[in-house]
Amino acid sequence: MGCLGRLHERGARAIEPRKDARDTYNEIVERALEQRVWSHPSVGSYYQNSKGRVVVSNPWLLVDSWTM
C-alpha cells in the first residue's frame, strides 16, 4: 500500500524495482522452489512450463509472504 500511496502522491503511473532487488528476490524464489514437490523430477503439473521449469508466482504460504 505504501508503494501505491507514493505513486499517487507523485502522479506516477508505474513503479519498477531496482535490478539488484529483483535479482535477489528471484534467487530466493528459485531456492525455495527447489524445496517444493512441484520441482521433483517425477512430478508433472500445470505449475511447470514446457521445459519443466516451475513458474508459480509465489512458493510460500500466504501468511509467510505477508510476514516477509
Image (tube, grey):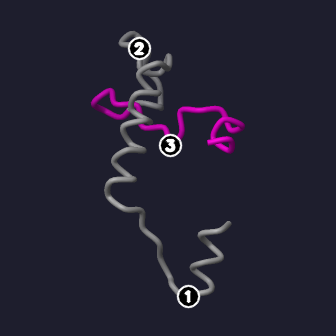
Does residue 30 lie above or below 20 as drawn? above
Q: Bin the neighbour count of mark 2 within 10 Å (Cα to Cα): few under 14, some 14-19, many 20 and up.
A: few
Residue that extends furthest to the bottom in the rendered view of this protein:
11
Q: Give the residue pinned by disc 1.
A: 10
In reply to whether residue 53 is colored magenta, the answer given is yes
Residue 8 placement: quadrant: bottom right
Q: Amino acid at mark 2?
A: His
| SS label for mark 1 | helix
Does residue 65 lie above or below 10 as drawn? above
Residue visible at 34% across and 30% down in the picture:
53
Q: Earlier in the sequence, mark 3 or mark 2?
A: 2
| SS label for mark 3 | loop
Residue 59 in the figure: left or right of residue 41: right
Callout 1–callout 3 Cβ contact below 8 Å = no
Work out how far the residue at label 3 is from the one at label 2, CA to CA, in angstroms. Answer: 18 Å
Query: What residue span does the magenta drawing correspond to?
Result: 49-68
Q: Tag count in the figure?
A: 3
Q: Position of residue 63 (x, y in %)?
A: 72, 37
Res 40 label = 2
Q: Earlier in the sequence, mark 1 or mark 2?
A: 1
Between circles 1 and 3, the one closer to the viewer is 1
Q: Position of residue 52 (x, y in %)?
A: 32, 26
Residue visible at 42% across and 62% down in the picture:
17
